[in-house]
Image (cartoon, rainbow, N blue to C red):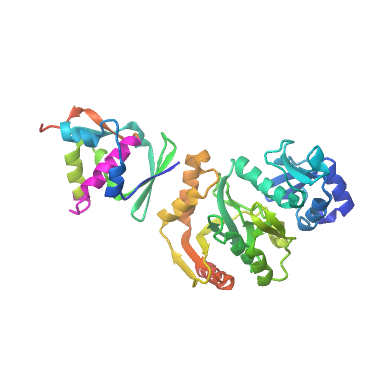
Amino acid sequence: MRVGDLPLQEWEHSLANGGVAIQFGSFNIQIRSNLVGFVSLAHYLYQPYPLAAAEAIADFHVGISSPKGLRRWVRRQSIFSLDGRSPFAPYPIGHAFPALEWGINWCVATRAHHLLMLHAAVVEREGSAMLFPAWPGHGKSTLCAALIHSGWRLFSDEFGLVRPSDGMLLPMPRLIPLKNESIGVIRQFRPEVVVGPSFHGTRKGTVAHVRPPADSILRAQEPARARWLVFPRWVAGAPLSLAPIAKSQAFLMVATNSFNYEILDETAFRLVTEMVGNCDCFSLVYSDLDEAITALGELARSSHG
Amino acid sequence: MLSLVLIITENLADDIRVERKSIATLEIIANPLVILTPAAGELIWVEWDDAYIVYQLSSTETHFFNETTALIIESLRQGPLSMESMRNWIMDELGGQSSDGLQLTMAVERLEELGLIDASDETAPGL
């Protein structure tokens, strides 16, 4: 059963009373909320996501709700909670949806230490995964959103989740939060893409969420092995450049872009060296999405022979 | 934690302040023998390009070593060496290319800080 199979009224009732557990790849997230605006938007954007089985254990119990006291009524706010505790300051009520999305990412980044977590977008084609480790502002999410609407499957725009037992990458195809100019770029790139409303004046500027294609969500339990490491950087007006880089340099960038390299110690070293050793590593500078997508598609085709 | 032992410049050298007497300092006054510590026997090495990525089990740190740094450890696997013998061995390994003396000294100091090499109580013969 999927979120969209629940009538809006039932969805609203369930969210307010005990919550609803949604499957985001290998994570089950129990979400509660009593905020009307949030509820209807979440129903729309989470529509294709599967509900977790009734007997499944939730990895995180999160909520987005009104705080107690005056702020429930005057200059209304929303507050994110994890296991009933609120780790962050309240957000304006209108930012409840991005607040919950950030909160869920925060839960994963700070707690899912049974996996190596790389700060990277990950997409897949024909069983091979391409990772885009990058610092914020380097165009990773925009490129990722464009690729998954050009024949690639979304694993994640934020987390390269590596399973320590076999080094496989696990999908977590969540919504992609585009920021500022990227929103218009993707709307123009593929007008059919499902993009939620723009939230202006958030802590990260204007944010809007892209819903991944249904196929990526449907196949969220299919892992893949890393085949390419591509370090992207969007530079206005720059000609396309896709150039090989040294593995030692790639290792440094992957390791320093990890959320928990230091926590996993030797396991992280082993996983990152194996991944870098097995991948072709490139630096990508681009300004035009179509050019970048064509180049990456050719790279994948040539590698697959 | 990631740490870097890469190209060491003179500017960097100017900034270094070593409080305890390092092997490099001792060399001037006593020509000590340099030895590997037990921690150096538990390193996991990956070599790519001209760089060595090394995981140190004892400290759970990952290091980036350049060739000179890697050769220091390699040279000491044969047993204790004086700085001079070590330098000669490394020069031979580099095919006669002279490893910059300052670079060698800095690499020795860094390896000592990491607890991978130490000065032996014994003194090298020839003093």
Give the residue furthest to the top: B121
Residue B26 x/y as whole percent:
21, 33
Residue A126 x/y as whole percent:
60, 64
Q: Residue at x 41, y 53 (%)?
A: A248
Give the residue furthest to the right: A9
Q: Indicate yes or no whether the magenta region holds residue B104.
A: yes
Q: Indicate yes or no whether the magenta region holds residue B45.
A: no
Q: Is residue A58 left or right of residue B58?
A: right
* Nearer to me, A244 or A277: A244
**Residue range (magenta):** B92-114
Residue B121 x/y as whole percent:
22, 26
Q: Is residue A89 above or below residue A233?
A: above
* Nearer to me, A163 or A251: A251
Give the residue furthest to the left: B126
Q: How many marks?
A: 0
Image quarter of residue A54: top right
Give the overall secondary structure of the magenta segment: helix
Q: Is residue B4 above or below residue B124?
A: below
Q: Is residue A53 visible?
A: no
Q: Is residue B46 visible?
A: yes
Q: Residue at x 88, y 49 (%)?
A: A10
Q: Is residue A268 left or right of residue A147?
A: left
Q: Is residue A161 left or right of residue B34?
A: right
* Nearer to me, A205 or A155: A205
Residue A302 x/y as whole percent:
50, 70
Q: Residue at x 72, y 48 (%)?
A: A100
Image quarter of residue A288: bottom right
